[in-house]
């Protein structure tokens, strides 16, 4: 197995990059599910800034970062409401997955909220 300058195998490095990408998307889906239903103008500006800049630190793989930024140009963040942001994150995730040959999943709001949204101890969503 080929090793990098620090002595770690390339396979291990790829795992770290893949894990960071998966962690990034789980974080983004969760963040969207907790985003305000009707965010203020200030919250919208903050979220737009965060989305445009966070991928560079989480995704790590230069080709994934480039694809993500191309996607931002084609489909800018929709941060005007929780529902639009949840669907935008799903659509972006699917676009990235398609571009790297991974499977996609349906962007159905109810299902996305069930998976990443807040739940009570009874298992029902706290957000309507």
Image (cartoon, helix red, strand yellow):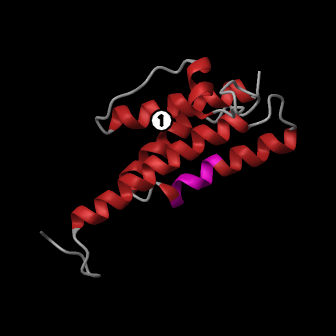
Q: Quadrant of the N terminus?
A: bottom left
Q: Residue furthest front?
A: 122
Q: Residue at (56%, 21%) from the top-left corner?
A: 111
Start-end of magenta stretch? 51-57
Residue extending furthest toward the left: 1
Residue at x 47%, y 20% (from the top left corner): 106
* Rendering coords of residue 42 (x, y %): 86, 44
Q: Residue at the spot x=23%, y=66% of the render?
A: 10
Instruction: Specify the principal SS of the magenta part.
Output: helix
Front residue of 117/41: it is: 117
**Left or right: 15 as drawn, with respect to 1:** right
In which quarter of the view is residue 89 placed? top right
What residue would you read off at disc 1?
93
Q: Is residue 84 visible?
A: yes
Query: Where's residue 77, x and y in %?
Result: 64, 36
Out of 128 and 57, give the one closest to the viewer: 128
Residue 51 placement, left or right of 99: right
Between 25 and 42, the one lying in front of the other is: 25
Residue 37 included in the magenta stretch of the image:
no
Q: What secondary structure is marked by label 1?
A: helix
Q: Residues within 10 Å of mark 1 (few under 14, many from 20)?
A: many
User: In this orientation, does residue 87 appear?
Assistant: no
Q: Quadrant of the C terminus?
A: top right
Residue 116 coordinates in the image, percent (x, y): 60, 34
Q: Is residue 86 above or below residue 55?
A: above
Residue 53 in magenta stretch: yes
How many numbered callouts?
1
């Amino acid at each position: 197995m080929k090793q990098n300058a620090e002595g770690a195998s390339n396979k291990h490095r790829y795992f770290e990059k893949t894990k960071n990408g998966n962690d990034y998307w789980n974080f983004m889906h969760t963040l969207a599910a907790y985003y305000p239903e009707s965010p203020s103008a200030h919250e919208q500006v903050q979220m737009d800034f965060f989305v445009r800049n966070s991928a560079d630190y989480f995704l790590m793989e230069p080709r994934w970062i480039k694809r993500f930024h191309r996607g931002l140009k084609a489909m800018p963040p929709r941060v005007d409401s929780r529902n639009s942001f949840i669907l935008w994150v799903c659509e972006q995730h699917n676009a990235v997955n398609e571009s790297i040959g991974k499977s996609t999943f349906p962007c159905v709001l109810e299902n996305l909220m069930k998976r990443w949204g807040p739940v009570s101890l009874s298992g029902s969503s706290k957000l309507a």
